[in-house]
């Protein structure tokens, strides 16, 4: 029997715990080590998930030759240095979103992974959820025809996060606000379903209107962003995202966040698909018919399926669903949204 890969988790908060549970669920790798500055948190994590080794400094974890790959679950500003250090140490990398703070950093990671023949993989477990897989299957079967437009929505009425040390609302540590925190989820969802076409230009505006709702020392990021993105295949996408806003009463309430709406809709020449509730709107002999799509509910969760793909990609058994080229393009779109807002005009995205 082939020896299982040894994985190390860097950062033992909620994301790290989800990845640890996925490792235990699919049993295709060993949760070998963890690292976290917080002694209480890392000790409890090591006890709960039975890691062989536990470190306070992730650089010590990276020195361990037994570690084959790492999962990075740190605050945004640490994604780039931790990922680069891991690649330089000869480890494959799965990093939580956003991949980096900007596209320039992500390009460095892509080149480093190519040079060392290592896998860089950014975490987007939502791509593996039942609804996304059902929608993707319908699209691949040609039931939408040519996709020409998509709407991506992730809005909250009172959902400004803070984080340990108030890093979420400080741009130098977070990279941005609502856009890079939750908007990136909605944008990636529709972009992935569209087939990840190359973005060519962006018109956008970001806003900071509700800083007074957060009791933090620094709030220099946006609490809302709106964007219109053009792709090289002629399709377009609209993004709407907010941490805070005076939303209308058709947006449902959500514990902790006031009201919240998360959805994706894609429009094609033969039909359209909506994720929530999951439905296909299909032209049948000139009549538009609503066709409920059934999502598999008896398969592993998104974290587990994502981890399986990561491990199989390392071993050359599968293509990575979330690859470094996509991570660069995603961060180029994020950069483009901020640039368009700053310049008050449409901005091009140069060909890679």
Image (cartoon, grey):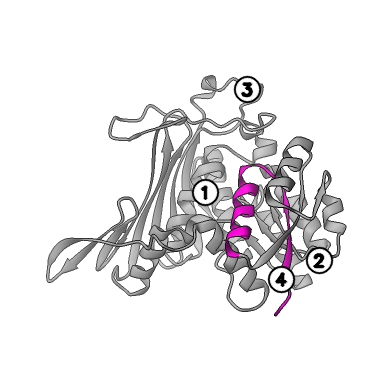
Mark 2 or mark 4: which comes first in sequence?
4
Mark 2 or mark 1: which comes first in sequence?
2
Identify the element where label 3 is drawn: loop
Identify residue for label 1: 184
Identify residue for label 2: 90
Quadrant in which the N terminus is drawn: bottom right
Which residue appears at 50% of the width and 60% of the height? Answer: 200
Identify the element where label 2 is drawn: loop
As measured in the structure, the alpha-carbon distance from the residue carrying label 2 to the one carrying label 1 is 29 Å
As measured in the structure, the alpha-carbon distance from the residue carrying label 1 to the one carrying label 3 is 23 Å
Which residue appears at 55% of the width and 42% of the height? Answer: 181
As measured in the structure, the alpha-carbon distance from the residue carrying label 3 to the one carrying label 4 is 45 Å
Quadrant in which the C terminus is drawn: bottom right
Mark 3 or mark 4: which comes first in sequence?
4
**Stretch of the chain drawn in magenta:** 1-26
Q: Please, is residue 54 above or below residue 318 in the view? A: above
Q: For this rendering, which residue is in front, 20 or 252? A: 20
Instruction: Where is residue 141? Give x, y as percent.
Output: 33, 75
Which residue appears at 52% of the width and 46% of the height? Answer: 337
Q: Which mark is residue 4?
A: 4
Q: Is residue 152 visible?
A: yes
């Amino acid at each position: 029997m082939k020896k299982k890969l040894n994985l190390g988790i860097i950062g033992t908060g909620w994301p790290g715990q989800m990845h640890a549970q996925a490792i235990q669920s699919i049993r295709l790798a060993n949760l070998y080590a963890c690292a976290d500055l917080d002694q209480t948190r890392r000790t409890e994590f090591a006890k709960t998930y039975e890691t062989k080794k536990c470190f306070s400094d992730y650089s010590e974890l990276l020195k361990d030759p037994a570690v084959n790959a790492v999962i990075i679950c740190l605050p945004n500003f640490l994604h780039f240095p931790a990922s680069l250090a891991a690649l330089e140490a000869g480890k494959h990398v799965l990093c939580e979103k956003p991949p980096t703070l900007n596209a320039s950093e992500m390009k460095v990671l892509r080149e480093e992974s190519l040079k060392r023949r290592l896998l860089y993989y950014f975490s987007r477990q939502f791509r593996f959820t039942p609804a996304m897989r059902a929608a993707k299957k319908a699209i691949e079967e040609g039931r939408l025809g040519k996709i020409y437009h998509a709407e991506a929505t992730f809005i909250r009425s009172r959902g400004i996060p803070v984080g340990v040390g108030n890093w979420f609302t400080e741009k130098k540590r977070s990279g941005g606000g609502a856009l890079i925190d939750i908007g990136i989820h909605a944008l990636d969802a529709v972009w992935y379903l569209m087939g990840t076409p190359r973005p060519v230009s962006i018109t956008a505006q970001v806003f900071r209107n509700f800083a007074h709702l957060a009791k933090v020392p620094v709030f220099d990021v946006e609490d809302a962003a709106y964007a219109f993105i053009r792709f090289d295949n002629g399709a377009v996408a609209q993004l709407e995202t907010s941490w805070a806003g005076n939303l209308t009463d058709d947006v449902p309430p959500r514990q902790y966040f006031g009201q919240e709406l998360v959805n994706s809709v894609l429009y094609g020449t033969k039909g359209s698909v909506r994720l929530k509730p999951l439905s296909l709107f299909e032209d049948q002999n000139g009549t538009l018919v609503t066709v409920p799509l059934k999502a598999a509910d008896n398969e592993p969760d998104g974290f587990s399926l994502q981890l399986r793909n990561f491990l199989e990609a390392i071993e050359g058994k599968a293509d990575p669903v979330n690859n470094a080229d996509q991570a660069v393009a995603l961060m180029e779109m994020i950069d483009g949204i901020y640039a368009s807002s700053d310049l008050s005009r449409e901005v091009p995205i140069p060909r890679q």
